[in-house]
Image (cartoon, rainbow, N blue to C red):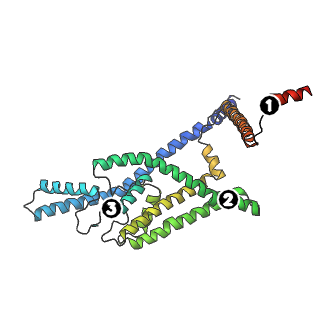
């Protein structure tokens, strides 16, 4: 008897705080996923880093042995300066791109990566004025970009997702949830083909040092706004039609980002995902809901009265002007 009462009380306790338990498991799962990623990246990349370090030490030792007139501090000072310039997108190699990093097309590409928060990091402002302007430009531009993307995605989603799903549901009578799931899968496959697989094949042809995997990696890293900067198109030696190529990449990144957001919005509108998300949200109390309903009713009533008053005023203004009767005429009619 006591065990059944204790069990029922535990079940009621869990059901009462179900959202908090789900949120706790969500936080725990996210932390474990972070740890899992760190373990995998460390185990995969650490051996390659060690081999590269050993290779650089051997090259440095061999270079100093072949050039005894050069001391190690002088070499390290020179290499430090070269690496510092390389971090700003300037290279001293003879086979490096001879194009400027801050011509109009390159600056346009940089501005698009800043506003979309991709930020490859291959080109950064050199001057203090450029850094200060980048801060102000980002503070204004990033919210502006979010507003722009939200408006575009909302309009595209209506024509690409909601109307087709509703049309198929009404025209052929299929279940709206099933139609939405099939539509989301097809839209995701179409987006993957048009903005990942096909561009990856194009980049693997246009970029000499990229294979298909590296090109697909660039597309994913860019459109997911991760922007690591290890692969940047249009920076090769003697790149043909570089200005046109940069403008095309800027348009591709903007359109691809819109397509990704449309797909995410389409999946987020699925009924199953909405139910899944609600498991982790805080449930509103009934009192709060009643307060919101009362406030909404008050606002609706006040808006209705305002609309009625404005309609009366408009009606009065639209009526033809009639002069008020004179006092003499009014007295005569009264005497009659």
User: Which SS class for mark 2?
Assistant: helix
Q: How many marks?
A: 3
N-term mark: 3 or 2: 3
The label nearer to you, 2 versus 1, is: 1
Residue most extreme to the left: 69
Horizontally, residue 158 falls left or right of residue 304, namely left
Quarter of the image with the C terminus is top right
Q: Is residue 310 above or below residue 68?
A: above
Q: Secondary structure at mark 1?
A: loop
Residue at 49% over, 70% down: 198
Asked whether residue 241 appears in the rendered view, the answer is: yes
Q: Position of residue 44 (x, y in %)?
A: 38, 57
**Residue at image location 49% in from the left, 46% down from the top:** 30
Residue 193 location (% of width, % of height): 53, 67
- Which residue position holds label 2? 163
Give left or right: position of 241 versus 66.
right
Find residue 202 and name its label.
Answer: none
Residue 83 shown left or right of residue 121 in the figure? left
Residue 325's image quarter? Answer: top right
**What label sits on residue 326 in the rendered view?**
1
Residue 213 x, y percent position in the rendering = 43, 67
Q: Which residue is mark 3?
A: 103
**Horizontal and vertical percent position of residue 207:** 37, 70
Going from the N terminus, do you reach mark 2 or mark 1 first? 2
């Amino acid at each position: 008897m006591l065990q059944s009462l204790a069990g029922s009380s535990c079940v009621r306790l869990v059901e009462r705080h179900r959202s908090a338990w789900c949120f706790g498991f969500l936080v725990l799962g996210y932390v474990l996923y972070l740890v899992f990623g760190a373990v995998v990246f460390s185990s995969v990349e650490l051996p390659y880093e060690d081999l590269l370090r050993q290779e650089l030490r051997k090259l440095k030792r061999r270079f100093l042995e072949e050039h005894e007139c050069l001391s190690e501090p002088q070499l390290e000072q020179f290499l430090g300066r070269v690496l510092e310039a390389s971090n700003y997108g300037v290279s001293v190699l003879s086979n490096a791109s001879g194009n400027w990093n801050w011509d109009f097309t390159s600056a346009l590409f940089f501005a698009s990566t800043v506003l979309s928060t991709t930020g490859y990091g291959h080109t950064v402002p050199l001057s203090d004025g450029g850094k200060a302007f980048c801060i102000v430009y980002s503070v204004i531009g990033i919210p502006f970009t979010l507003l722009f993307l939200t408006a575009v995605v909302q309009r595209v989603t209506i024509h690409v997702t909601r109307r087709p799903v509703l049309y198929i549901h009404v025209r052929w009578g299929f279940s709206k949830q099933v139609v939405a799931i099939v539509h989301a899968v097809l839209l995701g496959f179409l987006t993957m083909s048009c903005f990942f697989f096909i561009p990856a094949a194009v980049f693997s042809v246009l970029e000499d040092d990229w294979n298909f995997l590296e090109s697909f990696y660039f597309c994913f890293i860019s459109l997911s706004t991760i922007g690591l900067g290890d692969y940047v198109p249009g920076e090769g030696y003697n790149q043909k039609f570089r200005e046109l190529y940069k403008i095309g990449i800027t348009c591709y990144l903007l359109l691809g980002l819109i397509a990704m957001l449309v797909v995410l919005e389409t999946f987020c509108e699925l009924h199953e995902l909405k139910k899944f998300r609600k498991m982790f949200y805080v449930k509103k109390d009934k009192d709060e809901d009643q307060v919101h309903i009362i406030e909404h009713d008050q606002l609706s009533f006040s808006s209705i009265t305002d609309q009625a008053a404005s309609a009366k005023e408009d009606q009065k203004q639209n009526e033809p002007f009639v002069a008020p009767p004179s006092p003499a005429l009014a007295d005569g009619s009264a005497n009659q």
